[in-house]
Structure formats: structure tokens, C-alpha cells
Amino acid sequence: MSEVVREWQISGEDWYAEDLGARAWTDCTFTDVDLTESTSAGATFERCTFHNCRFNSSTHHATAFVTCDFRRTSFFDATLDGCKLTGSVFADCTLRPLTVTGGVWRGVTIRGANLTRLDLSGLDLRDADLSLSDLTGAVLRGASLDGATLRDTELAEADLRGASLSGTDLTTARLRGTLLDLPGAVLLAEQHGALVDPSG
């Protein structure tokens, strides 16, 4: 059984290249902690707060950041492989460049962030709030965006082919040169009030 750490207050520490393993953290607060080039595999952070932290060039496999609060935290050149970020909130964070391979980001709040040209293929973003974020040129092929909030989200030249969009209002996003497959195009047309005749 992995070690469980509860309600720790960690401030100003240097955890450069630290191996976090599969440890479980609950209700902990990290402030000004340097986690550059740190690694984790199967770790769990639940209801944790990260303020002014650095995850630069860190690598995380199947790690869960559930209902966490990230503020002014950098993920520059980090790798998130099959990670779970359900219900987490990102504010004033650096999220690119970032390597994302699968994972569940359901219900995340990432408002006003620069996410340009990120490859988020196949990512579960159901019920996510991406309002005011810039996803110019981002790849969202096969992603689950059901119920996502895209108010004033920049999706110019983004690739949404194969993405599921049930309950998502595309009319509130900024679409210029956005790639849509037939179901996505039909959804957009219907949301603009068009009557689509499937029989042609």
C-alpha cells in the first residue's frame, strides 16, 4: 500500500528531479516548490493546492490530480501520460509546451490559458470549462468535449475531427479555419438555426 500524506504544508522547497513514486497526497498545500524534472507513476494528489510551483520538464504516468488548485504554476515542457485531472482548476498557469497522452480531464477549469498547438487528441474533456482560452492550431481529434464550455474560446485552425460534442455550444467559440467532421459540421449548422436534411 502506498504511503498517504495528509495536510502537509510544503513551502519554498527544492524537489528538483524528485521521484514521487506512487505516494498519495491529500489536502496538502505546495507553495513555491520546485518540482522541475520530478517524476511520478501512479501517484495521487487529492484536493491539493499548488501556488507558484514549477513542474517544468517533469514526467507523470497514470498520476491523479483530483480537485486540485493550480495557481501561477508552470508545466513548461512537462509530460502527462494517462493522467487524471478531474475537477482541477488552473489559473495563470504555463501549460505549453506540454506533452499529453490520453487521460481524463473531466470537469477541469482552464480559463484564459494559452493552449495553442497542443496535441490533446483523445483526451476526456467532458464538462471542462475552456472559456477565453486560446486553442489556435490545437489538435483535439477524437477528444470528448461533451458538455464543455467554449465561451469565447479561440479555435482557429484547431482540429476537432472525430471529437464528441454533445451538449457543447460551438456558436459561443471563435471558429476560423477550424476542422470539423460531418457530425460536427451538422451540429454547428443546427446550432446556427439551419435545418439539416440527411437525405440530401
Image (cartoon, rainbow, N blue to C red):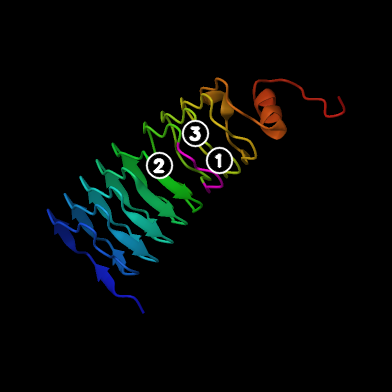
Range shown magenta: 118-124
Q: Can you tell which mark lies on residue 109?
A: 2
Crowding at dot 3, Cα within 10 Å, few <14 / some 14-19 / many 20+, comes out as: many
In the image, what residue type sits under mark 3?
Answer: Ala
- Residue 121 on the magenta segment: yes
Horizontal relation, residue 13 to residue 36: left or right: left
Answer with left or right where residue 143 lies relative to residue 6. Answer: right
Mark seen at residue 147:
1
Q: Earlier in the sequence, mark 3 or mark 1?
A: 3
Residue extending farthest to the right is 199
The alpha-carbon separation of the residues under discs 3 and 1 comes to: 19 Å
Q: Main secondary structure of the magenta part?
A: loop
Which residue carries the number 3 mark? 138
Q: What is the distance, in whole Å, between disc 2 and disc 1 at their CAs?
A: 13 Å
Q: Residue at point 72% right, 31% down? A: 182
Q: Residues within 10 Å of mark 1 (few under 14, many from 20)?
A: some
Element under label 1? loop
Quarter of the image for the C terminus: give it.
Answer: top right
Q: Position of residue 89 (x, y in %)?
A: 35, 45
Q: Is residue 64 left or right of residue 157?
A: left
Q: Are marks 2 and 3 in contact (CB under 8 Å)?
A: no
